[in-house]
Structures are given as C-alpha cells and as structure tokens.
Amino acid sequence: MTAPPSRPARIALVAFPGIRAFDVSVITEVWGVDRTDRGVPAFDLRRAADGPEPVPLRGGLSLTPDRALAWLDRADLVVVPGLDDHVTPAPAPVLDALRRAHGRGTPIAALCGGAFTLAQAGLLDGRRAVTHWNLTELLTERHPRVSVVRDALFVHEDNIWTSAGTAAGIDLCLHLVRTNHGAEAAATIARSMVTAPFRTGTQAQFIEHPTPRADRDADALAEVRAHALTRLAEPHTVAGLAALAGMSPRTFARQFQATTGTTPMRWLITQRVAAAQKLLERTDLALPEVARRAGFGSEVTMRQHFAAQLATSPRDYRLAFRDAGGGRGVDTPVPDP
C-alpha cells in the first residue's frame, strides 16, 4: 500500500447506515489529521458512500460523504468501520465496490464487526479473519466458509486485514501506518492519541476478569516491562525478569502471558524489533550497531527476527523507508520505545 512520495496516500473510509461512530472516529484520527509538521506523511482520507446523503450514526450523529464509491478505484487503502448491529446488511453497491477493490489488489482493512461486511461480500471465504471475541460464534454461524481466528488482535491474509473489537481497531490502523510509512510515523500518531504504538498478545488477555491478586501481579509485571524497555541492549532471561518481579520463573511466565497475551521472550523480541525499526529510520548507524543497541546481539539474529515479524530484512526496511521519503540524521538519539 506504500504510496508514491509525490502524493498523499489515499485512504477510503467506506460509509453506509449502521457503521459505528467509534470506528469512524478512529479512522479519522489516524488518517484524517494533518501531522506533516511532525514528520508524518500526508494522507488524503475520503468518506465514500453510495450517494451524497448524510449517513446516520448511533447517538444522533451523522457522517457526510465527500466521495462516491467509485473513489475506491483510486484508493491506496480501503477501511471498513465496524457495525452497531453486527448482522446489518451492507448495500449491494458497497459490496460490489469492495469486491472490485480487492480484485484490483487494493488492501482492505475491516475494524471489529466490519469483518461481517467483508464476509457478506464473499471476501473472507476460505480466508482467516478475526472479530471481537464475543462475536466469533456469530461470525462462524453466519459465514461458515470463513476461518475465524479466535484470539488475535488482528489478522492479515491475501491483502485483507481484520481486527478484534474496539481498541484493536486502533492497533490495526497504527500497524498499517507503521507497515507502510515507518515506525516513527506510527509512534507520532500514537503519542498524539495518547495510546501505545502497538500492543502485543491476543484477545485472551481481555476476556477473563482480573482478581485483586492479579491486579497486584500486573503492577509488578508493568514495572518489569518498563525496566526491560529502558535496557533493551542488555541480555534478559525469564529468570532474571522473574526475580525483579519477586516471582518464581514459572509463576512469572504464567502471569506474564495472562496479562499480555504473549510470553516474556516474544514480548521482548517485539520490543527489540520496534527499537531497531526506529534506529533504521532515524539514524545511519551500521546494521551491527543497530542490532547491538536493540539488544539482538548480532546482525544475523536481528535479520532473522525481521524476517519473522516484518517479512523483510533490516537493510530492505531502511531502503524502503528512504525511498518513501523518510528523513534521518546521523546517530540521531532515539527515545526508548
């Protein structure tokens, strides 16, 4: 979806009666605010609908379209908001426009219950998709040809993105910015929204209700994560982190996964990849030095994790960011991720 640097990336918000006001706000906040003065690329966000009439939203709100559905033909990314009523049928022209966009190879992202809209269009048949954990059974029942993933925050398959509920839509939007415009652009947007640039783990961390003991453990784990983030270049082990939390390694690993949805080492690797991304974007440091500062120990190890998480190499990531117009200074200080 990376757009040529000669023009803003074109984002189409698909609007029709029944879409959620929250998701519309998320999409608008991520791609509809001019942050070019802070180094974020320019975006051209348009509200595309089947007609010029205002689209009613819950709570007495309305959304005024500024483009017809034909504008999807020009978009670099199409985003479908979730639904207030998750079985709301989308208008036939909307479904046709989504099918055409996918047929042209345009990436399509659906937030939360927007997966139901893509399923109505047949775009999820035979493909993996995710929605809110409380809607997985309904999606499976209504659209049995969809391979429903039950615990991911977001899923990507065949140029189609789907996300879990509410806040996971923010995660997906920021991930799309990070993938196509760099980690620093996503981090800048996240800071302005007062949210995390990315979250690791799965929906499972949100399903169970915490107990007071779990709350105390979560506080201890938060302190350990903050400690590790400020010392990414240092070696870390589960045993060492567990000692900081005052837990046995086994208890620490179990509580860490329950709190974050991932293992301590997977979480640490994700943070190190993010730190390396910033260094590659903002400095001209040699790759071995980037690997050292991000805590990978060697360029080979960093390359392996980039391939696993980003499907690219550190060298290609840096070149892609440079080609997209990202600016860097020599050895510019990089704040902790």
Image: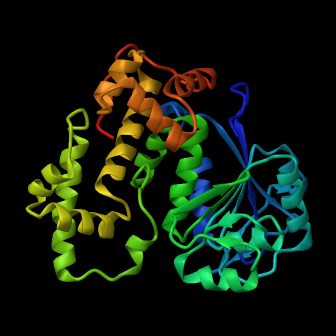
Instruction: Using the rendered view, name the quadrant where residue 6 is placed.
Output: top right
Could you tell me if residue 179 is visible in this image?
yes
Identity of the residue drawn at 66% across and 85% down: 138
Position of the C terminus by quadrant: top left
The correct choice, above or below, for 141 with respect to 46 in the image is below
The location of residue 84, given as percent across then percent down, is: 65, 80
* Nearer-the-camera pick, 30 or 113: 113
Q: Quadrant of the N terminus?
A: top right
Name which residue lies at 56% across and 75% down: 132
Question: Which color scheme does this rendered protein use?
Answer: rainbow
Residue sitting at x 36%, y 19%: 288
184 vs 141, nearest the viewer: 141
Q: Is residue 223 left or right of residue 306?
A: left
Quadrant hosting residue 141: bottom right
Asked whether 133 or 196 is in front, the reply is 133
Q: Residue at x 42, y 15 (%)?
A: 284
Task: From this view, report whether residue 156 is shown above or below residue 33.
Answer: below
Q: In this rendering, is residue 39 above or below 242?
A: above
Please indicate whether residue 56 sits to the left or right of residue 277 in the image: right
Q: Position of residue 62 (x, y in %)?
A: 70, 71
Picture coordinates of residue 21, whole percent (x, y): 62, 71
User: Where residue 23 sits: x, y (%)?
Assistant: 60, 66
Residue 184 visible in the current orientation: no
Q: Is residue 192 left or right of residue 134?
A: left
Which of these two is toward me, 199 or 144?
144
Badge count: 0
